Amino acid sequence: MNVLAVVEQRDGTLRRSSAEAVTAAKSIADAQGGVVHALLIAPDAGDAASLGTYGADTIHVASGAGAGRYDPDVFSATVAERVQAGDYFAVIFIASSQGRDLAPRVAARLDVPLAADATALAVEAGELIITRPVYAGRAFSKVVLNAEPRLLSIRPNTFRPAEANAAGTVENVSISTVTPRVTVRETRASEGARMDVGEAPIIVSGGRGLKGPEHWPLLEALRDALGSSAALGASRAVVDAGWRPHAEQVGQTGKTVSPQLYFAIGISGAMQHLAGMRSARTIVAINKDRDAPIFKIADYGLVGDAHEVLPALAEEIRKGS
Amino acid sequence: MKIVVCIKRVPDTEARIRIASDGKTIDPAGIKFVISPYDEFALETALRLKEASGSGEVLAVSVGESTTGEQLRSALAMGADGAVLLKGRTSCDGLATAYALAAEIREQNADLVLLGMKAVDGDQQQVGPMLAGLLDLPCVTVAASVEIEGESVVCHREIEGGVEVVEAPLPAVVTITKGDFEPRYPSLKGIMAAKKKPLAEKDAQLGPSRLEVRELVPPPERPAGRIVGEGVDAVPELVRLLREEAKVL
């Protein structure tokens, strides 16, 4: 049976996590003897055909009026209609802010359960075993979905895109004609925010050790040195103190993240923070206190004052890139 | 205006999580249970909406076993006017829970249904939009603020890289994230008053649970941390390791 990956585009270009979703779908489809379909809802196909590189056989593109801006009713109906038209073993969403809004709505439309935020997938004896973090990463649950199709979302940055040659044929499908019920009055960009902390492959997080919100330009300089895929994060303590917005908070009452690279700067490492970031691939900690709990899980620790170390670190990273 | 707030009983975020001997659930021994923090924000939002309008009713609803009565009493102590415990064993299948909530909310004729944007135990972020789907109501997720304007609800949502202001006609379902205020603590007066407020119990009309837990395992161990060096002098070595060993730069 085939597997459908619901992918996302931004400013006319596929998001990196779209390749991750196709790669995850391919691993299931191979075990099932099926092929991968992708579904993109966007004004035009753009670079969608490139998903063939990751194993997408057919890429369904729903364009037209309503495709340019995410609307929960229109998008969820479009996905549900596509799923009903195919005979899918599984449907994979990206657990991005959009995907986390979309997937449960599709699940309700199809009357099937959803396993959210998977970090690993395996097919054993024809069963899809989904591993997902619970208690903000303090335990992992291995679950199966006793329904068809199996709806799941994957955590960004946890499935590394793998090349696999497939046709990548683009087919146009129609966008649903349901009436939107939620209207957008206004969109305001936050100052300096570029990438959501839940989706960024590189995160630079600051804690109380920074001594005050006025020192955040130090973190911003490091983020900028790391390039456009880096985002700022924050500990609960600095969000509670009002230094940073809650949208940046990493931990159990914020976002649980699995980036490739995580910088914990001036963060001592409360349990609920460690739980929220310990599945990062590489962790760097910078802290004045050699006994801070964060050093127990940091792959690379540096004992020192962030105010002195950060400018040197940003400079050193810039030098080599 | 009648506002229903759905709350969930969860382990405190600082609780130590131990896996029970069945290998599928957590050992509740010694764990303090609380209202899921985002559900507390939802309840606070509901209470503020009621206070701002000067009238209305806030009803707290939860699906759970009899112990969940503790969290509903807390909700009453914070200021909810009434509470309903839908007795049943919840699972991690959010759709099964949404079925039970939908059955109750259909009877309540709520103008607005609020939930936390996620429960901090299962972290699936799904019950709110599923509930809206079952009730065929418009739904706004991850709202940091909620206001009523006539027959509509106006919300500020956290979106990637910014804030979106959206409007939906009532009745509607809205899921809440942390906004500009903290949930209130129950006052002594509130706690006393809560004892006299109605807490109804009904059997939950849960949907079939089709998300089956096979195993609960501890997080993968990380290799023991290593300290590269001290101060500015250690920076070149740190960057070299990130480039050549970890290959992340």
Image: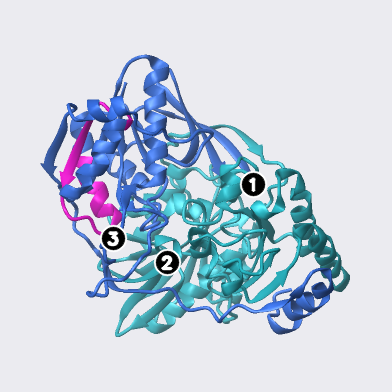
Chain colours: A cyan, B blue
Residue A200 placed where, x, y %? 62, 61
Which residue is the site of mark 1? Answer: B161
Measure how far apart labels 2 and 3 are at the Cα level.
17 Å
Q: Is residue A26 visible?
A: yes
Q: Quadrant of residue B26?
A: bottom left
Measure how far apart labels 1 and 2 are at the Cα level.
28 Å
Whether the magenta-drawn stretch holds residue B85 is answered as yes
The magenta-colored residue range is: B78-103
Query: Taking B169 as reference, is A240 above or below it?
Result: below
Q: How many marks?
A: 3
State the residue at coordinates (68%, 80%): B246
Residue A42 placed where, x, y %? 57, 52
Residue mark closest to the camera, 2 vs 3: 3
Which residue is the site of mark 2? Answer: A138
Marks 3 and 1 belong to one chain: yes
User: Which chain letter matches label 1?
Assistant: B
Residue mark closest to the camera, 3 vs 1: 3
State the residue at coordinates (46%, 73%): A25
